[in-house]
Amino acid sequence: MPSDPVDPAAPVLVINAGSSSLKYQLVRADTGQSLATGLIERIGLDDGSARHTVDGTDHVTEQEVRDHAAAFELLTVQFAEHGPDLRETAPGAVGHRVVHGGAKFASTVRIDDEVLETLRRLVPLAPLHNPGNIAGIEVALETFPDLPQVAVFDTAFHQTMPAAAFTYAVPLAWRQTLNIRRYGFHGTSHAYVSRRTAELLGRPLEETNVVVLHLGNGASSCAVEGGRSVDTSMGLTPLEGLVMGTRPGDLDPGLPAHLSRVSGLTLPEFDHALNKESGLKGLAGDSDFRAIEQRRADGDEEATLAFDVVVQQLVRHLGSSALVLGRLDAVAFTAGIGENSTELRAAVLQRAGLLGIELDADANATARGETRISTTDSAVAAFVVPTNEEWEIAREAMQLLAHS
């Protein structure tokens, strides 16, 4: 690894590698300016595709992408052909999104052999996500051997939770030997949005209490006290908490044993059903919230029930988060559904009057980008704050390298 100091103005190549996709962005850590974004999909299949976007122009390629090594080869080709030229606009670092860092990683770390080996040992905690993250790291180390590589964990932001918040009431041996506890996810989003919300309020982050509702195909809430996560809805895995596209959120823990007794359902079948067939899909047969809203508007009963269940869980978690914080300054909606669903935001906030939130219906209906959607005299503010996880990863990478 190079020992020379990293130029703080240099962009960071942010990598989010999944099992069959590679998402990337070249972003300046100091300003958040995105120089290029890209998505390579269907890795390992015959009909792979790549989209590279520069200055608002999409460059699309359709070709087979055999594996992650081929995906990184395609990434470098996209930059060479469509820009910016990585030799002229040289990244100062590569920042990797890693879903699960367990209890081992409480902050961003520079990747070395020991870190990589630890990540491999953590795969059982996130078998659907971490293998892809690791594959991306391994190939990036070969592709960019002269650049410092940094891992930023979805779980790290939540390592500030007190023991009362992360401890499950399960046997001691499970907790001590198997590291069974609440970890939480979407940490980079919760970190960025809570900090940006404090800025919009004009308050110091360390004096601001925010509940962030990250609502996308995956969804979680987070109680952020003075910039520190003190409670969150997701747990050991990304299944717990809010209703999601194909994941159920909170469940009775006796459900797997009950289904085994009455139907013979096996654990692999149960695991598949919870990850792929539950949530909105289980309630209404469709995991796309936009379709749910349209069907609800047309009077569809299943879609109406799905919408109502989502709202009920959001209200429940928002209320409990507010009580955990003790004082609430703002609620922030973010991610695809949170940023775009006027009706969902209204349904949640109309039931949040007890918390001191007064919805500005007109502002909510016309919200685009960062928008205050509570009235000016509302005791607790509410905002739409588009998340920027890539910028957060770039910031954390550069902050680490500046002090290493």
Image: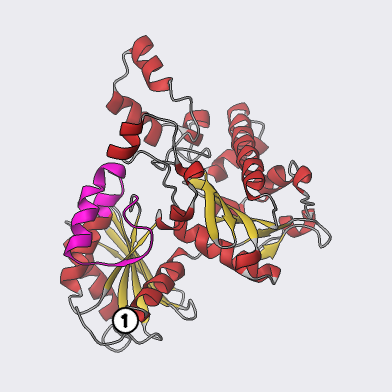
* Magenta highlight on residue 98: no
- Whether 108 is drawn above or below 55: the answer is above
Residue toward you, 57 or 39:
39
Residue topped by disc 1: 92
Query: For residue 24, which quarter of the picture?
Result: bottom left
Query: For residue 29, which quarter of the picture?
Result: bottom left
What is the secondary structure assignment of the residue under circle 1? loop
Q: Residues within 10 Å of mark 1 (few under 14, many from 20)?
A: many
Query: For residue 328, which quarter of the picture?
Result: bottom right
Give the residues drawn in magenta, as a range: 103-132
Residue toward you, 203 or 45:
203
Residue found 61% across the figure and 29% down from its top: 305
Q: Where's residue 148, x and y in %? A: 26, 76
Inspect the image, locate mark 1, and give the three-letter code of the amino acid beneath it: Gly
Q: Where's residue 195, x and y in %? A: 57, 66
**Location of the N terminus (image quadrant):** bottom left
Q: Where's residue 36, x and y in %? A: 39, 75
Q: Where's residue 85, x and y in %? A: 30, 84
The number of callouts visible is 1
Q: How is the image coloured?
A: secondary structure
70 lies left or right of 29: left
Residue toward you, 331 or 88:
331
* Magenta highlight on residue 119: yes
Q: Is residue 46 visible?
A: no
376 lies left or right of 395: right
Residue found 68% across the figure and 70% down from its top: 203
Residue found 46% across the figure and 53% down from its top: 158
Q: Residue furthest bottom?
A: 88
